[in-house]
Amino acid sequence: MHPTAVSETAERLDSGIADLAGFRDPDRPGWTREVFSESYRASRDWTMRRMQDAGLEVSVDHAGNIVGRMAGRSSSAPAIVTGSHTDTVDGGGRFDGIVGVLGGIEAARLLRASGATLDRDLLVVDFLGEESNPFGLSCLGSRSAAGELTPGDLDRQDYRGVRLGQAYRDFGLDPDRLTDVPWARRPLHAFVELHIEQGPTLQQRGLPLGVVTAITGIERVIATFTGSADHAGTRAMDDRRDAMVAAAEAVLAVRAEGCGAPTHGVATATRVDSESRSPNVVPSLVRMQSEIRSVDSTWLSGVRGRLSQEIAAKAGEHGVDVEFDWSTDNEIVHAAQSVQDVVASSADALGIPWMPIPSGATHDAVHMASLAPMGMIFIPSKDGKSHCPEEWSETADIALGVDALVQTITTLDGR
Ligand code: GLV
Ligand code: MN
Ligand code: MN
């Protein structure tokens, strides 16, 4: 590619990342732009304008996904889809998801600028609310597109008791239309998502690109511990039913589970809440939220049984009862070998060194995999930091990822 084009791409990526970073919740740390928030709502108009500036025809589907279309020669041929998300986690960074949306828009712009017309439509998507939310469900937009958002999901409640369906309504989306699956009516040729690695492997190996092999499965649990409220100054230590102590044992049990995983496996207690407000009362009701991830299905499928048993046994030692509310956020998903091969050969053709890599983070690609052969391209994350303000990827690496994406789309178009 011409050097001027390369630096223009870098400039557009940089300014796009900076502009989007301006849409953040001023009361929260980092670059917080959570789904259904005001900062997210405002950022979406910017994203639509960015797509229009790149010459894409923009629409928003019933699920709230922003779709930019670059028309191909045949509008009836199965389309190629790329994209990611622009929402962030509380206290999150500027690159997770954003690189895939801005990179997808830039790929379309570069394809247009080169005078190439694809045979197929190219759809660049900013999926609604990919990050997990207080309703415990990630990938809202891609899940809806794939017809995997259920009416039961819409009844999930956050910590304040607000239903997910109501959150959609408050955001201006009709929850009754989400399970009407617009995407499944149109056959798709392939889905490919550009994303930051969010881990340290590519940087450690000194490689600019990862070809994703599989995406982790995720199990989540809310454990509710019920003990007995008592005066913290008078109830003897050996005569307590302390729900907080049982929850603390559970936090350590979750960690031990992750440490005992045979291959890839991680387990994290992410939140503990006590109903007790007073500093002088033995806690009687405590909730602990955790998630467990792996690309090893044998290990992950046994996790519910193992952890429930261990946590209940420990709680029993403290005279505390426990109830579990388990849910699967997503199953383990493998990238299509055909798309992995195209990404790898595209990187080879451009002289970009790469390695195969599993993803410990989840992605919209998980759900798009049920609509089309799926693949992902990873670029390095500085020090493997992600879901925190320090999240960083070098512009040159992002631009290289965009090059690989353009080549991948072009090759897939001819298949
Ligand atoms: C999303 O980034 C997730 O892996 O939870
Ligand atoms: Mn992401
Ligand atoms: Mn994320």
Image (cartoon, rainbow, N blue to C red):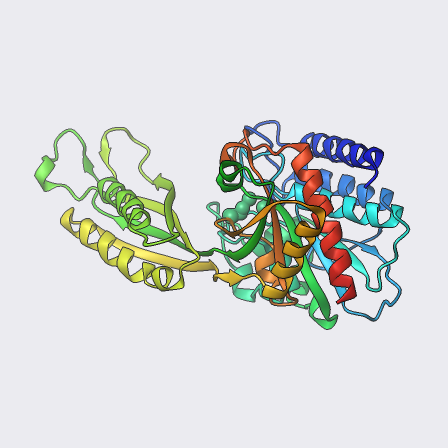
Q: Is residue 65 above or below residue 201?
A: below
Q: How many marks?
A: 0
Name the side, left or right, on which 329 lies relative to 283: right
Residue 221: quarter of image? bottom left
Image coordinates for residue 386, horizontal then vertical, percent: 52, 37
Quarter of the image for the N terminus: give it: top right
Image coordinates for residue 108, horizontal then vertical, percent: 80, 49
Name the side, left or right, on which 406 lies relative to 373: right
| Residue in front for this viewpoint, 342 or 259 | 342
Quarter of the image for the C terminus: give it: bottom right
Residue 5 in view here: yes
- At 78% from the left and 65% from the top, the residue drawn is 414
- The residue positioned farthest toward the right in the image shown: 115
Image coordinates for residue 353, horizontal then vertical, percent: 61, 45
| Residue in front for this viewpoint, 213 or 194 | 213
Residue 132 in view here: no
Image coordinates for residue 257, horizontal then vertical, percent: 29, 50
- At 72% from the left and 67% from the top, the residue drawn is 188
| Residue in front for this viewpoint, 301 or 329 | 301
- At 18% from the left and 38% from the top, the residue drawn is 230
